[in-house]
């Protein structure tokens, strides 16, 4: 059971640590809105990953053929979503910290939902999860229900631990940035996300 828990935590870290669109978005929101918004963004992405983890463990046979048959469509659609979201971040303008606390008070739910939607728009994460499960020999078929609960729970623990650490580190730089610095963060983050999306478009064509 301990080995299963460790494997779950490692898998949770593996799907969260790479600084893709969600990682960049988490950094941007932590700097411009506060640590709570960064954590919620990470948890939104993690929830999507857990949904695909559940699908991988229980319903893979029913969906894998459909995804393989429409892989280009999924890649193209996901890349478009990423590009548009990156463009939105580039255009967004940070406000002063005093105004920010008032404006962003009720936006934790929207931060969670947008992160979930952005991650969920790319079901190709199933193939990443399949590779990780095979690499770590994660949860054999016909394992007890407790093993599934512990495994999925530990994936959540590993992913959450990363978002807590990332937002903790990033939040230490927040007070050193003025409005100009926050604007630069938006430009850099949005540009990186757009580039990642464009790369996805190119891959979907070739």
Image: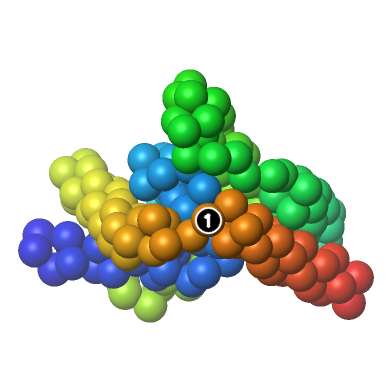
Picture layout, residue 113 above or below residue 178:
above
Q: Who is closer to the viewer here, 55 or 161?
A: 161
Q: Which color mode does the image show?
A: rainbow
Q: Position of residue 10 (x, y in %)?
A: 28, 69
Q: Position of residue 53 (x, y in %)?
A: 43, 50
Q: Quadrant of residue 136?
A: bottom left
Q: Who is closer to the viewer here, 165 or 172?
A: 172
Q: Can residue 36 be spotted in the picture?
A: yes
Q: Which residue is mark 1?
A: 178
Q: Position of residue 80 (x, y in %)?
A: 82, 53
Give left or right: position of 42 versus 186: left
How dense is the environment of label 1, judged by Cα within 10 Å: few (below 14), some, or many (20 and up)? some
Q: Position of residue 44 (x, y in %)?
A: 47, 41
Quarter that holds the C terminus: bottom right
Q: Who is closer to the viewer here, 11 or 107?
A: 107
Q: Who is closer to the viewer here, 86 or 123?
A: 86
Q: Residue at x 41, y 44 (%)?
A: 34
Picture layout, residue 128 above or below residue 113:
below
Quarter that holds the N terminus: bottom left
Q: Secondary structure at mark 1?
A: loop
Q: Residue at x 48, y 40 (%)?
A: 97
Q: How many numbered dots are placed on residues in this image?
A: 1
Q: Residue furthest right?
A: 205
Give left or right: position of 174 versus 185: left
Q: Residue at x 16, y 44 (%)?
A: 146
Q: Can residue 62 be spotted in the picture?
A: no
Q: Residue at x 69, y 44 (%)?
A: 93
Q: Residue furthest left?
A: 2
């Amino acid at each position: 059971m301990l080995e299963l828990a460790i494997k779950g935590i490692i898998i949770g870290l593996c799907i969260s640590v790479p600084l893709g669109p969600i990682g960049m978005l988490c950094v941007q929101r932590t700097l411009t809105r506060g640590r709570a918004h960064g954590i919620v963004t990470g948890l939104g992405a993690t929830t999507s990953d857990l949904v695909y983890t559940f699908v991988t463990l229980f319903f893979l046979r029913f969906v894998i053929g459909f995804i393989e048959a429409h892989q280009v469509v999924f890649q193209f659609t996901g890349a478009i979503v990423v590009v548009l979201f990156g463009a939105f971040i580039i255009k967004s303008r940070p406000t002063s910290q005093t105004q920010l606390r008032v404006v962003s008070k009720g936006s934790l739910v929207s931060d969670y939902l947008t992160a979930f939607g952005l991650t969920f728009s790319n079901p190709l994460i199933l193939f990443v999860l399949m590779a990780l499960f095979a690499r770590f020999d994660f949860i054999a078929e016909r394992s007890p229900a407790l093993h599934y609960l512990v495994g999925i729970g530990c994936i959540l623990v590993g992913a959450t631990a990363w978002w807590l650490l990332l937002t903790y580190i990033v939040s230490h730089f927040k007070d050193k940035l003025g409005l100009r610095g926050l604007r630069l963060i938006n430009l850099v983050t949005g540009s990186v996300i757009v580039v990642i999306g464009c790369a996805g478009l190119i891959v979907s064509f070739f």
